[in-house]
Image (cartoon, grey):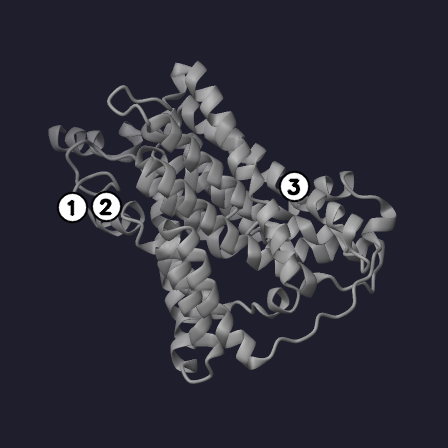
């Protein structure tokens, strides 16, 4: 009987808490959204399963959790906390992304830049809120600059770029990493839910019906030169973005050079898939109830939503402003793709546009600001690194 009792004391049934059960339900919800609704399944399935793993209760002293030094999950999590996984993800993104739409219409980069306003607006909001509500834990007496670092890490959620959010928070505010990562990936998955109402609210029916001529294809020489010029220009402006943008443009050069197709194919297929599984699983597992279920996490999730909505709105409004000066009008819906959720934001633009005019094809135009948003959010992260790192 003593042996049976000792075994029971070490089971999850004895050690489970209400917080564990809540997080397990959250993990199952993520998997449901991925399978039933097809919301970013490549991200939400490993993240949801990671949340479940991270909240399986176990007795103290058993070295299996993600925060137990030397455990398997802890070793895999090192790729997140050290910022290794995000640049590897960017390598794969670069190898699968076609920058032709941006090259043929470079003015669309302004829409990607406008969408980054949400990052800096939310940074200010997080500073205001964190300085007045001590219970949020956004201040650290030992580090006078911690509030700014935490606010910058929260603000970057507005870029809808999970790897960038993970990279910046791992460098500036590692204690907030779990909540920021979950928020960033949640809003990436919810792009089809959050963006359409904002897009319709800020545009007229006539604007949503604007047709745009097919983009002019970019030449091979332009496609090869672009990652080289992009690397030099962006990294001279924001050297802190070197790990992200360096890998992004390297992946794109592998794709466009025409002589490294084998490397490009590996980067955009098996390589990025492996890193995505490890990143999603460990980010999910980092949400142990004891560390995640706090007012701080709720505040980060709410601020992240505000950041994402502001970013979407600024992209649309910037497109409308550009139309004041352009002879050849652009459909302002494509401004919503300025957030860097590639290619989901562009698909949402296509969906909303075709609800107005079924044979209006906007996705290739939307890919311009979409890939500009990827570059813009990484540059914003580099600027924040330089300011607060």
Which of the pair 339/187 is nearer the observer? 339
Which quarter of the picture shows residue 369?
A: bottom right
Which of the pair 307/237 is nearer the observer? 237
Rendering coords of residue 161 (x, y %): 49, 49
**Residue depicted at x 17% and y 41%:** 69
Marks 3 and 2 in Cβ contact (< 8 Å): no
Label 2 belongs to which residue? 74
Numbered circle sitting on residue 98: none
In three-dimensional space, the C-alpha distance between marks 3 and 1, rounded to whole angstroms, equals: 45 Å
Rendering coords of residue 145 (x, y %): 33, 27
Rendering coords of residue 276 (x, y %): 40, 57
Which quarter of the picture shows residue 135?
A: top left
Circle 1 residues within 10 Å: few <14, some 14–19, many ≥20: few
**Residue depicted at x 52% and y 32%:** 122
**Residue depicted at x 83% and y 65%:** 359
Asked whether, in this view, residue 226 is left or right of residue 353, the answer is: left
Numbered circle sitting on residue 314: 3
Q: For the residue labelled by badge 3, is the local secondary structure a helix, a strand or a loop? A: helix
Say above or below: 144 vs 265: above
In three-dimensional space, the C-alpha distance between marks 1 and 2, rounded to whole angstroms, equals: 6 Å
Asked whether, in this view, residue 293 is left or right of residue 174, the answer is: right
Location of the N terminus by quadrant is top left
Label 1 belongs to which residue? 70
Marks 1 and 2 in Cβ contact (< 8 Å): yes
In this view, the mark in front (3 or 1) = 3
Location of the C terminus by quadrant is top left
Say above or below: 135 vs 358: above
Circle 3 residues within 10 Å: few <14, some 14–19, many ≥20: many
Q: For the residue labelled by badge 2, is the local secondary structure a helix, a strand or a loop? A: helix
Q: For the residue labelled by badge 1, is the local secondary structure a helix, a strand or a loop? A: loop
């Amino acid at each position: 009987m003593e042996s049976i009792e000792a075994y029971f004391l070490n089971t999850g049934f004895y050690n489970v808490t209400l917080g564990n059960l809540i997080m397990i339900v959250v993990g199952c919800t993520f998997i449901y959204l991925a399978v039933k609704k097809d919301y970013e399944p490549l991200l939400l399935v490993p993240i949801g399963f990671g949340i479940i793993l991270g909240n399986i209760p176990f007795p103290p002293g058993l070295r299996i959790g993600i925060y137990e030094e030397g455990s398997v999950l802890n070793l895999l999590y090192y790729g997140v906390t050290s910022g290794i996984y995000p640049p590897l993800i960017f390598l794969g993104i670069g190898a699968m992304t076609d920058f032709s739409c941006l090259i043929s219409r470079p003015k669309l980069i302004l829409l990607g830049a406008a969408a980054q306003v949400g990052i800096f607006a939310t940074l200010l909001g997080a500073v205001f809120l964190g300085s007045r509500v001590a219970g949020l834990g956004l201040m650290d007496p030992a580090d006078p600059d911690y509030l700014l670092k935490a606010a910058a890490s929260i603000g970057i959620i507005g870029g809808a770029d999970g790897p960038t959010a993970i990279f910046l928070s791992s460098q500036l505010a590692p204690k907030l990493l779990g909540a920021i990562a979950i928020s960033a990936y949640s809003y990436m998955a919810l792009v089809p839910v959050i963006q359409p109402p904002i897009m319709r609210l800020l545009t007229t029916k006539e604007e949503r019906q604007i047709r745009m001529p097919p983009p002019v294809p970019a030449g091979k020489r332009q496609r090869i030169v672009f990652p080289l010029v992009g690397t030099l220009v962006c990294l001279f402006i924001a050297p802190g973005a070197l790990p992200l943008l360096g890998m992004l443009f390297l992946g794109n050069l592998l794709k466009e050079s025409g002589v490294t197709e084998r490397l490009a194919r590996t980067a955009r297929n098996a390589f990025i898939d492996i890193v995505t599984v490890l990143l999603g699983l460990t980010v999910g597992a980092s949400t142990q109830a004891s560390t995640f279920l706090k007012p701080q996490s709720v505040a980060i999730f709410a601020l992240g939503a505000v950041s994402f909505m502001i970013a979407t709105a600024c992209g649309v409004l910037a497109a409308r402003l550009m139309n004041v000066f352009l002879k050849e009008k652009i459909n302002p819906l494509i401004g919503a793709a300025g957030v860097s959720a590639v290619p989901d934001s562009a698909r949402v633009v296509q969906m909303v546009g075709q609800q107005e005019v079924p044979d209006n094809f906007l996705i290739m135009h939307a890919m311009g600001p979409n890939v500009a948003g990827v570059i813009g959010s990484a540059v914003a992260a580099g600027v924040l690194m330089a300011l607060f790192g």
